Image (spheres, rainbow, N blue to C red):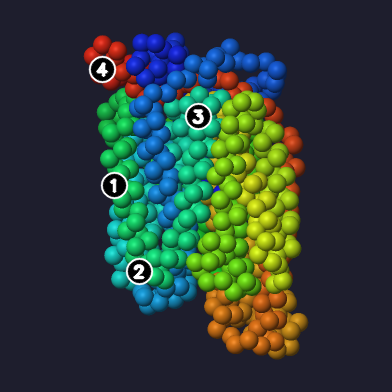
Amino acid sequence: MNDPSSTSPNMDFASEKAELSIGEPGHFSIPPAPPNVDAKKENSVNTAMAQEEHDPDTVDGSSNDASKFEPGYRFYLAFSSLAVLAMMVSLDGTSVSVALPIMARDLHGTAIEAFWTGTSFLLSSAIFQPPIAALSHIFGRMPALTFCVTCFLIGIIISGLAQDFTVMLVGRTIQGVGGGGVILLNDIIITDLVPMRLRGAYFGAIGGVWALGSMSGPVIGGALAYKATWRWLFWINIPFSAIGLVMVPAFMKLNLVPGSTAQKLKRVDWLGNAIFIAATTSLLIPMTWGGVQYPWSSWHTLVPLLIGVAGIVGFVIYEKCVAAEPTIRLSLLGSYNMAYSLFAALINALIVYGALYFLPLYFEAVRGYNPILSGVALFPATFIVAPVSIISGMIITKTGDFRGVTWLGWIATTLGCGVMILLDVETTNLQWVFLCLCTGIGLGFLYTSLALVNQAASDDSNMAFAISLFIFFRAMGQCLGVAICGVIFQNQMETRLLTIPSLASQAGEYSKDASSTVLTIKSLPDSDSKRLLVQAYADSLKIVWAVMCALSGVGMLGSIFIRKGILDRALNSEQALKQRSPRSGQDLENTNMKNHR
């Protein structure tokens, strides 16, 4: 329930000489010599902490930057490109899951292979986000975004044509690389184009588009899978990808990063990226298959998990001591607001994806709905996210403070998860609609506010890297949401079934996987055993909601200590929209970027 680099010149959006009013370069100069990495890290920490300790009643000298922001038609065309791409990825992210049983049948696959169809997308999406952010800093946003959209399109075609799960997994993995990159670069580019004080409204708008895609995805996916063919789940995204490939180069006229291709290739942190990708892959894979494909106590789970942890430690040491231009700027972690934003992103995503995964299962197993109706039943929790996200962005833009919206978001989320414990076999339609509504309101507030907590804690030179960490932790939360909630459900379900004599012998089988148990329940004839199984299912989910409520409470308590960041800051972006000459109408290059590092 939808993130986002470099030392930069000021871009004053008040420029009257530029046709699009996106300003002229300021006076921030960059020394031509290679930067002192340690000094940059220290400056980054000092800047972030200074922002947090700034007197809340005092406004930065550049506070008028937001009031002078007058976006022209090229800005809105560029922003529309981002909205189209957000719709593309969000639609895909929620439409495929409801079709997995039919895909498994048609491709003659197992439940485990169907499980990996969704998981492979999430894993590759998370793992490649920090490297993509670093590459966009070196090669430029537009080339990076074009690459990601191309990967997404290639993945769509491979998945749509797949005749077995091996090909399907290859396609979904490539699609995940592209989808994760699009999610990340959307947020980064917004920070390149919009002053921080005004970003809340634009993040809210993208959040609204994201919620719309996520809300309609299960309905469209269920309808296509059960009424036509699941392959249309991939084909319907081809127009979005094609439009994106046209709109990005046509309208995303951003300042180019100077330097030859050879120079840029030398700047890439090749070894750091390799270590990070290998370590996070080793860490996340056992987290996703633990308790599903292999027991948590199995060496198949523990060995790669330990290797992944060791790899992350090695990566941190390498980035701190060796890397000339690190993929992840560890200096960013020096402020409470930054550390909190990453923790909150993980917790928030864990709750979102835990709810998105288990709420449809509640509707199918306990309420007896089919997959299409289960998708429709998610509307109260998802539909409200869009307007609330937009409203929260407007509030932050108006007040210049993200703390109140953040507190309100956590209160609503905690309350929403808490009242979901009331969901039971006897819950009426009107009751579950209102019970799910509160959670959606909270998640809508947090979508925008947490992103601004993260960005306000970073200086402009490290903004893209701060956003990449934020989006990565959010992606980690997505993976952990299903895994942790799944383990809780399994343990609770088995415990309850062991107390029912007629079901005790099958407790291990029925509790192994929440989604496969839904099919078991639907296949059983009406009997006391079926009713007891359904009740055990509903009771087990109550513990899942309770854990989500507790985690939300932790996030709420942590938010008490966040400090007010400075949102009234001049826009310092090296990769903003190009200026246009008022005389010739030609795009002007940003000459102050020649020493971009």
- Tag of residue 462: 3
Kind of element beneath mark 2: loop
Q: CA distance from mark 3 to mark 4?
A: 32 Å
Mark 3 vs mark 2, foreground winner is 2
Q: Residue farthest to the front?
A: 430
**Mark 4 Cα shell of 10 Å, populated few (<14), some (14-19), many (≥20):** few
Residue contact between numbered discs 2 and 1, judged by CB atoms under 8 Å: no
Mark 3 vs mark 4, foreground winner is 4
Q: Residue at x 59, y 27 (%)?
A: 397
Q: Residue at x 64, y 26 (%)?
A: 399
Above or below, 304 relative to 8: below
Amino acid, disc 2? Thr
**Mark 2 Cα shell of 10 Å, populated few (<14), some (14-19), many (≥20):** some
- Tag of residue 585: 4
First in sequence, mark 2 or 4: give its number: 2
First in sequence, mark 3 or 1: give its number: 1
- Tag of residue 229: 2
- Tag of residue 242: 1
Mark 3 vs mark 1, foreground winner is 1
